[in-house]
Image: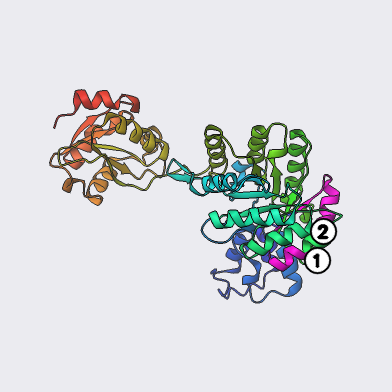
Amino acid sequence: MALKALDIYKLLPKKNCKECGDPTCLTFAMKLAGGKTDVDLCPYLDEGAKAVLGATTRPPIRLVKFGIGERSFAVGEEFVLYRHEKTFYHPPGILFKIADNQTTDEIQAVTTRVLNESFIRVGADLRFNGIAIENASGSADTFARAVETVEKTADLPLALMAKDPAALSAALAHCGTYRPLIHAATGGNYNEFCALAKHHDCPLVIKENNIDKLAQLGKDCITKGVQDLVLDLSPDSLQAFIVRSTNIRQLAITRVAPELGYPVFLDASVMDQQDAALVLGISKYASVIISNPLPQATAKAALTLRQNIYTDPQKPIQMNPGLYRVGTPNKDSPVLMTVNFSLTFFTLQGYLESTRVPCFMLIIDTEGLSVLTAVAAGKLSEMLVKESIKKFAVEDEVSHRTLIIPGYASPLSGRIEETTGWKVLVGPRDAAEIGDFLNEEWKK
């Protein structure tokens, strides 16, 4: 079990030397308890204390990195079983699978799609992470050519899926320095697979359909010098995946079985219901998910779900406060004020764009709260509006002094007029009605 801050403090030297970067040993202990610092930063700990604290304060699930460069990603380093307890930190990487016996054009098409396809949702750029290449042909040369084709097409993280160490060796000759994920070591081949992973410094998937065997295989691979492991639970059904992934997460988080404290791998493409497996993998602890290329609608749904699950539930998604333009507004264009809750921003922006009326959006910092909540909590006030008008130089952008505020902010309308000197128009409560409001109420 993880130690509490006071238990950790008892093991520290209590010098308050500040050499760890914290003002006191107690502060350092509190950070260690929360997994926000490293025990090695204390220069005065003896090896025994380091061993105890290292085992209990480091993340219960190891951080594992894939790929090199801009599109590289990391998984693991999670602390909780449920996201509302804290949050989930590292979204699962979703890789599209191709077979090495597909044509060059087919391989290039999938690779190019992963490289270029993205869509923006609530201010975030959502995209898939990489390519999984399967040695379906059984030929080392064919496998190597497929990997070479992908490498020449795009710089993306790769997962190399083969049973033959010779095929993996041939493929790694093309991409071994870019940290591809190697899949998968088993009880029968782990010596050869560990040798390849260690030589190329690559993360390694270990695969068993029994948790005890998986834990032992992990220990064997660590003994061989491979530290970056990913666990393939080899489920034969969706139910088996849920049960095994949940059990492993519980054992890792509680540190009952630290040898299982590694990210989880799921090949959704081999499941009877790939879409359902993809959803379960995102929701139930899979860190690397392999999928056949998805239709556009399903792709957007999967990326949206991943974004929702891996957004901190205790922190609203916020936009940067400021003055935003919709279309090409001029000195006579309306100014609409709203809060920096991202859903509010993008909903209003979408409806404003559909009106084709050029305008300004003045976004006020309410710490990510919605209009109604911000008004009730006192986070949206007349003084904040006045300061924002001045800070973002709204008066320099328009010749008028008229401000449109959201309908739910109507209780503030009089105070805003008195404090800012601007005329206030109270807009609709429903952003869908903003087009009619502008046509009927806005006067240039």
Cβ atoms at labels 1 and 2 below 8 Å apart: yes
Q: Position of residue 341 (x, y in %)?
A: 40, 40
Q: Amino acid at mark 1?
A: Lys
Residue stretch in magenta: 195-220
Residue drawn at x 68%, y 46% is: 101
For the stretch drawn in magenta, the main secondary structure is helix
Q: Which mark is residue 224?
A: 1
| For residue 354, side relative to residue 12 (left or right) | left
Question: Quadrant location of residue 221?
Answer: bottom right
Mark before the other along the chain sequence, 1 or 2: 2
Residue 213 included in the magenta stretch of the image: yes
Count of marks, rendered view: 2
Q: Which mark is residue 88?
A: none
Q: Secondary structure at mark 1?
A: loop
Split into 4 quadrants, where in the image is the C terminus?
Answer: top left
Residue 68 included in the magenta stretch of the image: no
With respect to residue 141, does 24 lie above or below? below
Circle 2 residue: 190
